Amino acid sequence: MNRTRTLVLAALAVVVALAATLVWRLVERRPAAAHAAASLPRFTGTAPAAHVPAPKPIVIAELKPPCWGCPEAATWPVRYQTDLDLLAPLGDGAGNAALWLKDFSKPSGARLAEGEAEMARRTERPDGSVLPPDDPLLKEAEPWADQATMQFYPGVWKMTGFSTPIPNLLVAITIARSWVGRARLHPDAPESLEDCRRAIRWGRLLRQEDVTLIQDLIGNACIRSGAQGIYEIAARRGDAPLMLAAAMALGEHAPQRFRMAEFATKMSVFGKDGFHATDDLLSEILKVSKSDPNRRFRLEAITQLALVRLSGSRSQRRTAASALDELAATPDAVVAAQVRWALQYDSRELSQLFK
């Protein structure tokens, strides 16, 4: 048991390092003004009452660890194949958790200063920086993790390509880690498992929209943190079925991270030496933009088409423009908004991209 736990923790340490690398890859490609959220009024409502169902019963004989290294995995969406309802089903609250979280966004969220003060109160723990267990923000966030929806686009923010606003993801992941950190302080308390489940629900909500790579990345990290906490508590209590279900979820975190890193690396048409899109790369971008099961991948591919439309060869430019015209007819409002941005993106904006 101790050896298994040590191996899991060692593997997770590697994944954390990979996560930091991927975050850098995603952020460093963006212009300095990217993710500048517009100033919006503070949300003054409260989270609607919600019911969170009990996790599904775990039947060991029915658990099938997914093989992310098998050929069939190449067609899977980059999502958990393990049913996360075994660990932490979503609540049924009718509120939109994005309305609450958006107030902490940079640079002009209505509660940005408050959020930064909260981050200054974090303490370092072996599993990361966390808030004190009795911090008011954790209590305030709890009912929002019980909602069924977290939707930023297009209700809160519009899609604007490289400058699409994003929530304050440092606040988001700190909340999840702090719930798990609180559970670790009192692992035998009845509410410890609920804190870990709450972190998983929070991560599932962050991933729900499937719009930006970096928000999905942070949502996945929240799920990992909660699943790790559940694994530890289940091991302590001798709950083998729960421990196995949590271990399966943990085992899926790294493959998804690798797939994200692979995509972020191979899809970029600009590198240190400037524009480098080959016809083969453009063909791959076209395929992703039209049919990939991951919407965030499609949206990222559309931003690359915007660059090809301006910087590619004459043939590449025609191909990119034609593909964008075709994609404009999509019924998906978020994708359609990204396409409209891509068709309007101009050379002046491009010149500012890597300054």
Image (cartoon, rainbow, N blue to C red):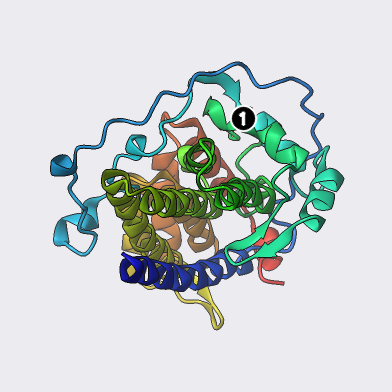
Classify residue 170 by image quadrant: bottom right
Q: In this view, does 162 lie to the left or right of 90?
A: right
Q: What residue is rendered at 30% in x and 30% in y?
A: 56
Q: In this view, does 61 lie to the left or right of 268?
A: left
Residue 309: percent from left, percent from top: 50, 59
Q: Which residue is drawn at 15% across and 61% down?
A: 71
The x and y percentages for residue 173 are: 61, 51
Quarter of the image for the N terminus: give it: bottom left
Q: Say which of 183 and 220 sits in front.
A: 183
**Which residue appears farthest toward the bottom when viewing the image?**
273
Which residue was labeled with disc 1? Answer: 144
Find residue 139 and report its horizontal and vertical position in percent.
69, 34
The reply, left or right, for residue 286 in relation to residue 181 is left
Residue 349 seen by the camera: yes
Residue 209 visible, this orientation: no
Give the residue type that dot 1 points to: Trp
Q: In this view, does 235 lie above or below 179?
A: below
Q: Is residue 323 above or below residue 190?
A: below
Point out residue 51 in the picture as x, y percentages from the top left corner: 49, 19
Write the residue at 72% across / 72% down.
355
Count the marks.
1
Residue placed most toward the observer, 331 or 235? 235
Q: From this viewpoint, which residue is outermost toward the left?
A: 61
Task: Estimate how packed mark 1 is, as few (under 14), some (14 to 19) or many (20 or more) residues with alpha carbons within 10 Å.
Answer: many
Mark 1 residue element: helix
The front one of 163 and 263 is 263
